[in-house]
Amino acid sequence: MNRLPENALPHGANALPSDTDRRNSPAKMQIGAVLARMGLLFFALAVAFLGAAPIGFWLFGWEGVAAAGLAVAVCSFAGAVAELSPLFFSQVLTQVLFSMLLRVSLPMGACLALVGLKHPLVEAGAIYQLLVFYLITLIVESSLAVGRMRRQESIGSL
């Protein structure tokens, strides 16, 4: 193929990356880690929804289930977008601040929109559901962020 002679590069390095180098590139590994964190977040929110939906149905009927579904959808979207921050920012502090901004503004904006529109889901507990699922999202993502920062610190100290 298009490889240089062994003595052309220091220590016998090849000019073209091998297939294993491309499969294990840092960018692909980082995307895999982001997808894994999103999966954990979605799993936690799905488990919480399985607990909240029957309570919503018991208290408000199908509108209570819809309120729980709306809360899960908004918090899942906010969490997923917040988890993408390592792909765009290299500094950990910037990643955390961007994640916090998205994680807070989207659910709270949804609360303000529901109240401002006097939506019927407000009467069905949508605000309470959004706050509960926001807290669940905050706990899960904060624990994932602390783990990510610890791993980056341990890699940086090597």
Image (tube, grey):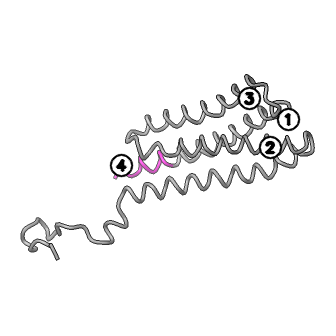
Q: Earlier in the sequence, mark 3 or mark 1?
A: 3
Residue in view at x 20 percent, y 67 percent: 16
Q: Earlier in the sequence, mark 3 or mark 2?
A: 2
Q: Residue at x 14, y 71 (%)?
A: 12
In terms of depth relative to the viewer, which is nearer, 157 or 57? 57
**Amino acid type, label 3:** Leu
Q: Secondary structure at mark 1?
A: loop
Q: Can you tell which mark lies on residue 114?
A: 3
* Magenta span includes 153: yes
Q: Quadrant of residue 58?
A: top right
Mark 4 secondary-structure assignment:
loop
Q: Which stretch did the figure color magenta?
A: 148-158
Callout 2 environment at 10 Å: few (<14), some (14 to 19), or many (20+)?
A: some
Using the rendered view, name the quadrant where residue 8 is placed.
Answer: bottom left
Find out whether the residues at labels 1 and 2 contact each other: C-beta distance under 8 Å.
yes
Task: Give the labeled residue for mark 4.
Answer: 157
Amino acid carrying label 2: it is Ala
Please give the label number shown on residue 66.
2
Q: Indicate left or right for 88 with 48 as reference.
A: left
**Quarter of the figure that contains the N terminus:** bottom left
Q: Residues within 10 Å of mark 1 (few under 14, many from 20)?
A: many
Can you tell which of label 2 and label 4 is closer to the viewer?
A: 2
Residue 149 in magenta stretch? yes
Residue picked out by circle 1: 124
Task: Report the number of discs.
Answer: 4
* Pick the front one: 76 or 70: 70
Q: Nearer the viewer, mark 3 or mark 4?
A: 3
